[in-house]
Image (cartoon, rainbow, N blue to C red):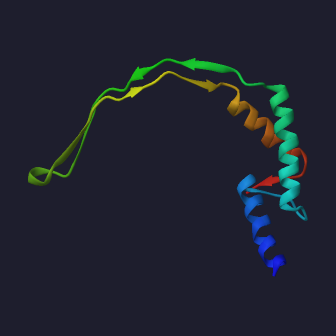
C-alpha cells in the first residue's frame, strides 16, 4: 500500500518543481537535481540586482459594457501602489536555467 501512496507523491512533487520539462528515461528527482544545479550556476552568473520601484497611484478608469438602456459602467478609483523592489536579473537568470537544462538533455514541452 505504501508503494501506491509514495508514487503519486513523487510525481506530484516532480510536477510542481518544474512543469513542462522532460528527458527520456529521467526521473522527476533527476529534474529537481539538475534544476538545482542550473539555478545555482545562474545565481552565481547573475546575482540579484535589486531595483527600487517608487510608490505610484494608478489613474482611475471607467469600463462600460452593453448599449442603450442596458449600458452598464463600472468606475474604478485610482489605487495606491506602495514602494517595492524587483530583481532586474530574474528574467535573464531564467534564460540561463533553461539553457542549462537544455544542455543537460532536457526538453521543454
Q: Position of residue 5 (x, y in %)?
A: 77, 74
Q: Quadrant of the N terminus?
A: bottom right
Residue at 70 percent across and 26 percent down: it is 89
Residue 2: which quarter of the image? Answer: bottom right
Position above or below: 100 against 44: below
Position above or below: 77 against 8: above
Q: Is there any visible trace of residue 19 in the rendered image?
A: no
Q: Quadrant of the C terminus?
A: bottom right
Q: Nearer the viewer, residue 17 or 2?
A: 2
Q: Is there any visible trace of residue 4 in the rendered image?
A: yes
Q: Position of residue 80 (x, y in %)?
A: 38, 26
Numbered-mark total = 0
Residue at 85 percent across and 40 percent down: it is 38
Residue at 91 percent across and 48 percent down: it is 104
Q: Position of residue 86 (x, y in %)?
A: 61, 26
- Going by the image, does 81 lie left or right of 87? left
- Going by the image, does 92 lie left or right of 3? left
Residue at 81 percent across and 30 percent down: it is 43
Position above or below: 8 against 58: below
What is the residue that sits farthest to the bottom in this orientation? 1
What is the residue that sits farthest to the front in this orientation? 2
Q: Nearer the viewer, residue 68 or 78?
A: 78
Q: Position of residue 81 (x, y in %)?
A: 43, 26
Amino acid at each position: 500500500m505504501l508503494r501506491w501512496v509514495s508514487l503519486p507523491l513523487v510525481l506530484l512533487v516532480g510536477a510542481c518543481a518544474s512543469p513542462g520539462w522532460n528527458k527520456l528515461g529521467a526521473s522527476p528527482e533527476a529534474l529537481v537535481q539538475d534544476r538545482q544545479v542550473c539555478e545555482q550556476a545562474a545565481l552565481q552568473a547573475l546575482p540579484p540586482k535589486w531595483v527600487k520601484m517608487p510608490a505610484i497611484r494608478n489613474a482611475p478608469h471607467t469600463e462600460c459594457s452593453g448599449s442603450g438602456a442596458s449600458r452598464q459602467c463600472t468606475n474604478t478609483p485610482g489605487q495606491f501602489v506602495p514602494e517595492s523592489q524587483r530583481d532586474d536579473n530574474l528574467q535573464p537568470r531564467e534564460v540561463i536555467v533553461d539553457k542549462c537544462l537544455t544542455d543537460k538533455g532536457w526538453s521543454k514541452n
